[in-house]
Image: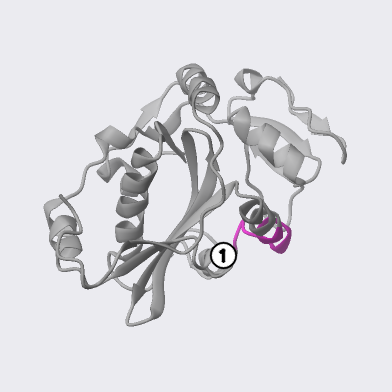
């Protein structure tokens, strides 16, 4: 199948099961809220750079983490129990996504978080469809992540850290918060050693899409939340 070229307006997407072998579903269009909602509800996400049009993807297999499968290494568990960090939810979404865009990635030059994408996800967050988790040390933002939250699904998008384990701490705490609030599926998009260490696994796209549909239908889209503290430095029981 050749990817479909999308018009600027409208939210139509082809069947993601008919993506090309690399997982490309469609090209072009815009990042308006309606189109982003439609894309994520179908298991499709945008990923491109400043030198390409908007590219829409649904890879096969799909790397996912089921919240009950979250694995925390002994070294990370020790770090969490020292309670050095304060972890918050939705306290600094715009700063988190900008820091993610600025972070260097091994083997990559530039960033896929171009200005129009940053603006689109900040708007998505303001409407209650995207979350951030932040890690603080002595009042300084040292790590965090953001992603899209629809019903019982969280789509992890990007993370950053300037101190060891800072993004991992944010990820662990948001995983627990998500599980407590009805999330049954965490989308990691493509497999990485980082996510596999947390217990993520590859899932055939058809199974991912089936679970996605059920998770979105069974759980209401959450209301916007902001400023929630998931863990403070003075907490003594950060993890069970």
Total marks in image: 1
Residue 21, position in %: x, y?
A: 58, 25
Q: Is residue 33 left or right of residue 62?
A: right
Q: Quadrant of residue 42?
A: top right
Toward the viewer: 8 or 171?
A: 171
**Up-down relation of residue 176 to residue 56 (above or below):** below
Toward the viewer: 223 or 47?
A: 223
Mark 1, secondary structure of its residue: helix
Residue 128, position in %: x, y?
A: 60, 49
Q: Residue at left 35%, top 39%?
A: 179
Q: How is the image coloured?
A: one colour
Task: Tell me where the magenta segment starts and ends, as one range.
Answer: 111-119
**Residue 236 colored in magenta in the image:** no
**Up-down relation of residue 155 to residue 134 (above or below):** above
Toward the viewer: 90 or 72?
A: 90
* Residue 113 visible, this orientation: yes
Q: Residues within 10 Å of mark 1 (few under 14, many from 20)?
A: many
Where the N terminus falls, by quadrant? top right
Residue 96, position in %: x, y?
A: 51, 66
Q: Residue at left 47%, top 40%?
A: 154
The residue that label 1 is drawn on is: 101
**Up-down relation of residue 127 to residue 44 (above or below):** below
């Amino acid at each position: 199948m050749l990817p479909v070229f999308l018009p600027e307006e409208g939210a139509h997407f082809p069947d993601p099961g008919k993506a090309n072998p690399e997982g490309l579903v469609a090209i072009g269009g815009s990042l308006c809220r309606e189109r982003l909602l439609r894309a994520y509800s179908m298991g499709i996400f945008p990923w491109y750079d400043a030198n390409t049009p908007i590219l829409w993807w649904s890879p096969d297999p799909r790397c996912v983490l089921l919240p009950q499968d979250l694995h925390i290494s002994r070294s990370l568990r020790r770090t969490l129990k020292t309670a050095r960090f304060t972890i918050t939810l939705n306290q600094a979404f715009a700063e988190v996504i900008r820091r993610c865009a600025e972070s260097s990635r091994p083997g990559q030059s530039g960033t896929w978080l171009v200005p129009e994408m940053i603006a689109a996800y900040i708007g998505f967050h303001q409407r209650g469809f995207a979350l951030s988790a932040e890690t603080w040390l002595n009042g300084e933002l040292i790590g965090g992540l953001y992603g899209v939250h629809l019903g019982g699904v969280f789509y992890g998008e990007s993370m950053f850290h300037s101190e060891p384990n800072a993004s991992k701490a944010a990820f662990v705490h948001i995983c627990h918060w998500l599980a407590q609030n009805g999330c049954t599926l965490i989308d990691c998009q493509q497999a990485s050693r980082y996510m596999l260490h947390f217990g993520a696994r590859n899932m055939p796209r058809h199974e991912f899409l089936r679970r996605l549909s059920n998770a979105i239908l069974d759980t209401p889209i959450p209301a916007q939340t902001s400023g929630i503290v998931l863990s403070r430095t003075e907490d003594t029981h950060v993890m069970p």
